[in-house]
Amino acid sequence: MARDTRRRFEAEAAKMRPQIRAAFLQAIADIKRTADMDALITALERGDVAGALAALKLGPEYFAVLDEAVRATYAAGGNYALSSLPKKNPATGTELVIRFQGRHPRAETWLSRRSSNLIVEITAGQRTAIREVITRRLVEGVNPKTTALDLVGRVDKLTKRRTGGIVGLTSREALAVENYRLELAGEGRKADQIDRMVSRYSNKLLRVRGERIARTETIASLNAGRDEGMNQLIESGEVSADAVTGTWDSSGDGRVRDSHAEMDGQTQPQGQPFQSPVTGALMMHPGDTSLGAGGADTINCRCYKSISVDYFAGVT
């Protein structure tokens, strides 16, 4: 039996995080690759923002690969939690074999809600960022083809893939790209040099966003899977509901949020949320948004939930 420790949890997170990051970047690459450029340019020529968005085809179907990565991470969390259990129940001496049920209705409900919220957040954010850029470009009278290329990126001569563009970025990041382009133009640089430099900058921002999403979703999904694994242990009848407790463990370094540093050592029974004394946010585990916790308490969270099982609780 491998014990459930912060180090082991972080190793599991490090293993799953690249899958989520790669899935997000693949989804964005697919959107750029399949954008209807002719329809996009035509819509921009007409000043038709809705038509331009339609040409970009920002549908949730592109994020199916991200949905699967979240599902795999959740299942890894559940299997990880149950693999940490002893081979025999210390209280009864009987063999302890619990298999994680990834298709349990409770698990399916969590996955459906989490994936739906994530994809809606990304696609809605995309539409807002792109709409803002298009609106500014129309006011400025920028050539429609130039705007289209600035949205989806330009085809790299070597890889034959689109690179750069603001598709995939948040509104704030897209604005940073626009400002960088204006700054370079103000320096009197040539158009092709500006395009190359802006593409590299937007690619960097996209990678940073992909890593941010990956860190946030990995922590949330792994922890939710761990919680579900414990719920299934309780349902098996091997332990009572009050036998499982969780303790919030902040990272303890200089980068931890004040709100989470204050939570360090807070212990709750399984099924009861932790509460930040600073923000008031309720969370079943680090990264949890199911009770309304916002990005200030979840994005890039590095905290750990230590889970304890008292096999002798209630045994007489």
Image (cartoon, grey):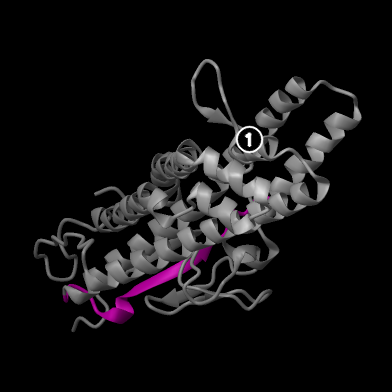
Q: Residue at x 66, y 51 (%)?
A: 46
The amino acid type, in three-letter code, at marker 1 is Leu
As drawn, the residue found furthest toward the top would be 158
Q: Residue at x 64, y 42 (%)?
A: 166
> Mark 1: few, some, or many residues within 10 Å (few <14, many ≥20)?
many
Q: Secondary structure at mark 1?
A: helix
Q: Position of residue 9 (x, y in %)?
A: 41, 49
Q: Nearer the viewer, residue 42 or 242?
A: 42
Q: Is residue 207 left or right of residue 271?
A: right
Q: Which residues are magenta?
A: 237-254
Q: Position of residue 301 (x, y in %)?
A: 57, 56
Q: Nearer the viewer, residue 216 or 199?
A: 199
Above or below, 210 against 279 in this view is above
Q: Nearer the viewer, residue 103 or 256?
A: 103
Q: Is residue 234 visible?
A: yes
Above or below, 240 against 18 in this view is below
Q: Position of residue 216 (x, y in %)?
A: 52, 54
Q: Residue at x 43, y 62 (%)?
A: 306
Q: Position of residue 245 (x, y in %)?
A: 39, 72
Query: What residue sits right under mark 1 in the picture?
Result: 149
- How many numbered discs? 1
Q: Is residue 256 visible?
A: no
Above or below, 123 against 163 in this view is below
Per the image, is 53 magenta?
A: no
Q: Nearer the viewer, residue 200 or 280?
A: 200
State which quadrant residue 48 falls in.
bottom right
Q: Is residue 61 left or right of residue 51?
A: left
Per the image, is 247 magenta?
A: yes
Quarter the C terminus occupies: bottom left
State which quadrant residue 269 falls in.
bottom left
